[in-house]
Image (tube, rainbow, N blue to C red):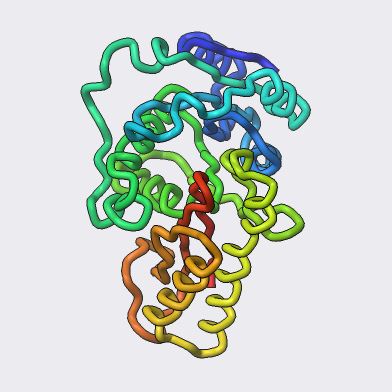
């Protein structure tokens, strides 16, 4: 695996690999877990050259969020990526990605970026979309892979690529879970031992909502309220539980198909998100 810290270095390596090479890109912020590694292996099915990136993007963190304490585990990450068969690791510093303050940004539509996670993390998706666009321009991949656990992020990236006519196929990787159902996340490491035992409840409750919908219960607001109440009763602080359309995460009508159930809630000081498609 080749490691590149400069844009010029990555571009030169991909150019040397040959113009006929199909590049598959997997952007990450590091602190890798099995969900990331599953994406790397899936990327091999879509590309001749697999490019992973590690960059903790300041633009998508709000003041008071965990940018400074976000785990930087480069050596462990490097080893895991090499073992997964990644060809190129792009790991720039902030000066390489933002040699001057970023003046141009990608602003997703408010109806996509101002709801759900965007309501509770204003500006997050603006920063995310901006750095993803930069990574697309740097690596110029034919395919890029993102995990479905960050469902709203995946939706925004798909729509950005479509609306801006980017020649990139976006592939969503299935959420990888621990044996008790908890979705793997870099932030799970913040949980205390007691919180880690409680954390699978989020997945369990979403599973019940999906079962209710499949059984014919289309009172989505009541399902959402019931789930919020159950989380609160177990010392969670829910931001939202929402039944939405998969395509654009807007409100569904009764008896509509193509749905996803999403949730975000704090357990102690850790904010967890999860979703299940119906």
Residue 242 lies, in percent from the top left, at: 41, 68
Left or right, 81 with reference to 130: right
Specify the quadrant of the image occupied by residue 197. bottom right
Question: Against 243, is 41 above or below?
Answer: above
Question: Against 97, is 189 above or below?
Answer: below
Question: Against 162, is 60 above or below?
Answer: above
Q: Which residue is at a point 42% across and 27% down the rendered structure image?
A: 57
Question: Against 122, is 22 above or below?
Answer: above
Q: Which residue is at a point 45% across and 49% down the rendered structure image?
A: 154
Q: Which residue is at a point 54% across and 33% down the rendered structure image?
A: 28
For the image, the number of numbered tags is 0
Tell which residue pokes out farthest to the bottom in this image. 216
Residue 96 lies, in percent from the top left, at: 41, 12
Residue 61 lies, in percent from the top left, at: 37, 33
Q: Work out whether residue 128 or residue 69 is closer to the camera in this orientation and state it.
A: 69
Q: Work out whether residue 112 or residue 178 is closer to the camera in this orientation and state it.
A: 178
Work out whether residue 190 can be spotted: yes
Residue 115 lies, in percent from the top left, at: 30, 56
Left or right, 192 with reference to 138: right
Left or right, 150 with reference to 118: right
Quadrant location, the N terminus: top right
Q: Work out whether residue 183 or residue 146 is closer to the camera in this orientation and state it.
A: 183
Work out whether residue 259 can be spotted: no
Q: Which residue is at a point 55% across and 42% down the rendered structure image?
A: 145
């Amino acid at each position: 695996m080749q490691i590149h810290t400069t844009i010029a270095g990555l571009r030169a390596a991909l150019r040397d690999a040959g113009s006929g090479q199909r590049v598959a890109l997997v952007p990450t912020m590091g602190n890798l877990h099995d969900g990331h590694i599953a994406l790397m292996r899936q990327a091999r099915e879509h590309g001749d050259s697999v490019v992973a990136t590690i960059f903790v993007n300041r633009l998508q963190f709000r003041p008071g969020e965990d940018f400074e304490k976000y785990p930087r585990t480069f050596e462990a990450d490097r080893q895991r990526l090499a073992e997964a068969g990644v060809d190129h690791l792009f790991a720039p510093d902030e000066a390489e990605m933002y040699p001057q303050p970023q003046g141009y940004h990608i602003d997703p539509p408010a109806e996509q970026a101002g709801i759900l996670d965007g309501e509770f993390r204003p500006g997050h998706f603006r920063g995310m979309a901006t750095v993803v666009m930069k990574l697309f321009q740097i690596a110029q991949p034919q395919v890029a892979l993102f995990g479905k656990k960050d469902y709203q992020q995946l939706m925004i990236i798909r729509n950005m690529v479509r609306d801006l006519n980017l020649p990139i196929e976006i592939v969503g990787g299935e959420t990888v879970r621990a044996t008790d159902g908890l979705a793997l996340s870099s932030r799970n490491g913040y949980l205390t031992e007691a919180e880690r035992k409680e954390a699978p409840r989020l997945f369990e409750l979403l599973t019940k909502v999906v079962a209710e919908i499949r059984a014919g219960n289309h009172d989505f607001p009541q399902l959402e309220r019931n789930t919020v109440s159950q989380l609160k009763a177990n010392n969670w602080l829910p931001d939202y539980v929402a039944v939405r359309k998969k395509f654009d995460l807007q409100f569904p009508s009764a008896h509509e198909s193509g749905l996803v159930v999403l949730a975000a809630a704090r357990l102690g000081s850790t904010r967890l998100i999860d979703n299940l498609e119906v």
